[in-house]
Image (spheres, rainbow, N blue to C red):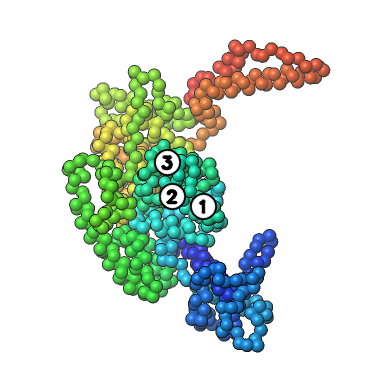
Amino acid sequence: MNKLARLLLCRLDRVARQDAQRNAHANGLLSLKIVEVDGHLLRRYSPAFDTERMGGDRDRDLAWIRRTFAAYLLPPPQQSDIVVTEGKASTALLPSLYRPGQATADDHAAAVDHRRRAYAVGLVGRAGRAPLVSNIVAALVLARAIENTRMPLARIVQTIAMAAPVVSLHAPVAGFERAMRRLIELPGFLPGAVPNGIDGDYVYDDGSFAVAEGTGRAYIQFIGESVHRLTGATLQRRLVNALTRDYPVVAISETAQHIPSEISIAADVALVGGWLDYPFVSMMLEAMYGDVGLAALTRWTTAYDAHYLTIDDVVLAFRPGRGAPEVIDVLASLTERNRVAARDGDDEDDEPASKATGKSSKSKQDASPEKSSSGKDSGGGWKRDKPSGAEVIQPEPWGPGQDDRPSLMVETLSGYGKAKTWALDLKADLADHRAGALAWSDMSTKLLLHGPPGTGKTTFARALCNSLQVPLVATSVSTWLQGGHLNDVIAKMAKTFAEARAIAPSILFIDEIDGIGKRQPAEREYADYWNTVVNKALELLDGAVKSEGLVIVGATNRPDQIDDAIKRSGRLETHIEIPMPDVATLAAIFMHHLGDDLAVLIGDAGKLNGEAHDEVEADAAGTHVEGPPPPENDAAGDSDEHGSGDTRKGRTT
């Protein structure tokens, strides 16, 4: 188990201990005193019961507290029936704890050694209810999603602490939406006030949300497929209204397509988790049973695929009082049941997709309202999501008969150097190919772009789409790996290439291509998994070479993490680096985006500087002279000198 998973589990354990101590105080088992330490108000509990029965053996003392005070660790029936004075616990509920003539609870607590009191309070916290299994599962899934992202944990925490962050959570596991919502709203799990989720589609109108006062920190949530009840314009208005009121926005879904593009684009934190797998089962056993539970993993064979498990299945298996071997047996039975259901459902589902309609699986999924986001159909059968996840972007139309060119084209980009040259050469070659003067095999159609984050690799792909006037199929390796299960990953990779070939000529853009990794030695853990993924990528790239009309552009921040076979001749053979823009390139970028506004700004700045200079000279002479404004032709000359000309000037070569 990694450090992040341990951190979240410790957080859950701390919340459970605090709940037990609060309940014990409300029931009179602990007394409370508020103290100030360095400007911070802290709760200081003291035992209001006789601690002489504790002998120092931790296990025996813990069992004694649970046996004697079990009812005091639960929430009180009615808070109004318990009267607690300032700093003093009510002893009305403790008639049997003190014999007649004995000192009061406060006197006894004051006389007991500090270490003994702290020991007793700690045992009271541990004697309460353990964290819910559903929260433990959600915490581990969240830990793995955070681990998969490239965003540091400190940055994630800092972003979430902002006034109105936008957070997106996705994991293709049935039950993820409910479990994650419970985890977020668990009091004490997140720093600050207790979150209070308000459904984004439950509003009186587009400008007001049904937020009750005094119910914690309100946030607007979009859960699963319910968000599709809102149209794009309505959804955008509600997002803007929520953010202008400093309400955080959280989107949680088990299907990537159910997270609106407006939220995906505006998300400050986007976390994507994978399917449940063997390492997850190992982490659950360690979390519930410690190192002893890991010995039961010998009962889990390769025939069982944890990918078929849901969060509800895990909760059913890990029941209190059940041993680790019994848990493995239950998980194995649930896995086999779901696998058979998925196999039978897929056999029925695949035939009409290719023969009857000829549509992609994504279109078929959108046209099937009976299939829920939890991965289950209305008949109770378990089914997996099967779209490739690729986004098809059509070029903005432009031709000889149209005056307005697309706003984003390779011809107008600055700072791309050799990548721009490659694109313009490809455009000329494509025109020759369409005229029958050049064979497709003689063209350079495979490119690997690399460079630091934020240099515009994705922007280049979209500009290339408009310049070549061919559709763009945009995907990423992280999209392929969302399935987690090897068969699903391979299927998504093959389907993406098939979708791009179906609309050829087209551009297939693969972002984060370093996620495929390198082939590993056979003795390495999960070597078979990653070697199969790399070999499939090589096979698809070789097939793409033979496919006429398919341009492939891969993008990465870490070219050294890509298998050398992928970068060889015939595959992604052209390697071009996009560096960070220098000062001249930044000036050209500003000129491109500002356009005519830049000339006006420079002209106004020159006019203001001239007037200020005249006023300074006049003041120095002891008089104030208001001179005429500069001639318009001078301002125009300034504008031509500083703001016009080729927008590509100063680009990186």
Q: Can you give x and y, in whole percent of width and height, for residue 432 in the image?
A: 29, 24
Q: Nearer the viewer, mark 1 or mark 2?
A: 1
Q: Is 40 situated above or below 107?
A: above
In three-dimensional space, the C-alpha distance between marks 1 and 2, rounded to whole angstroms, equals 13 Å
Residue behind mark 3: 235
* CA neighbours of label 2 inside 10 A, class few (<14), some (14 to 19), many (20+): some
* CA neighbours of label 3 inside 10 A, class few (<14), some (14 to 19), many (20+): many
Residue 33: image quadrant is bottom right
In the image shown, does 430 or 355 lie closer to the viewer? Answer: 355
Which of the two labelled residues, at mark 1 and mark 2, occupies the earlier sequence position? 2
Residue projecting furthest to the right: 622
Amino acid type at mark 2: Asp
In the image shown, does 178 or 468 lie closer to the viewer? Answer: 178
> Residue at coordinates 28% horizontally, 63% vertically from top-left?
335
Instruction: Tell whether 431 sits left or right of 22.
Output: left
In three-dimensional space, the C-alpha distance between marks 2 and 3, rounded to whole angstroms, equals 12 Å
* CA neighbours of label 1 inside 10 A, class few (<14), some (14 to 19), many (20+): few
Which of the two labelled residues, at mark 1 and mark 3, occupies the earlier sequence position? 1
> Residue at coordinates 52% horizontally, 47% vertically from top-left?
247
Residue behind mark 2: 199
Residue 303: image quadrant is bottom left
Amino acid type at mark 1: Ala
Which quadrant, please, contains the N terminus? bottom left
Q: Can you give x and y, in whole percent of width and height, for residue 374 in the image?
A: 33, 54
Q: What's the mark number on residue 212?
A: 1
Q: Is residue 266 visible?
A: no
Residue 555: image quadrant is top left
> Residue at coordinates 42% horizontally, 29% vertically from top-left?
408
Instruction: Tell whether 368 sits left or right of 641.
Output: left
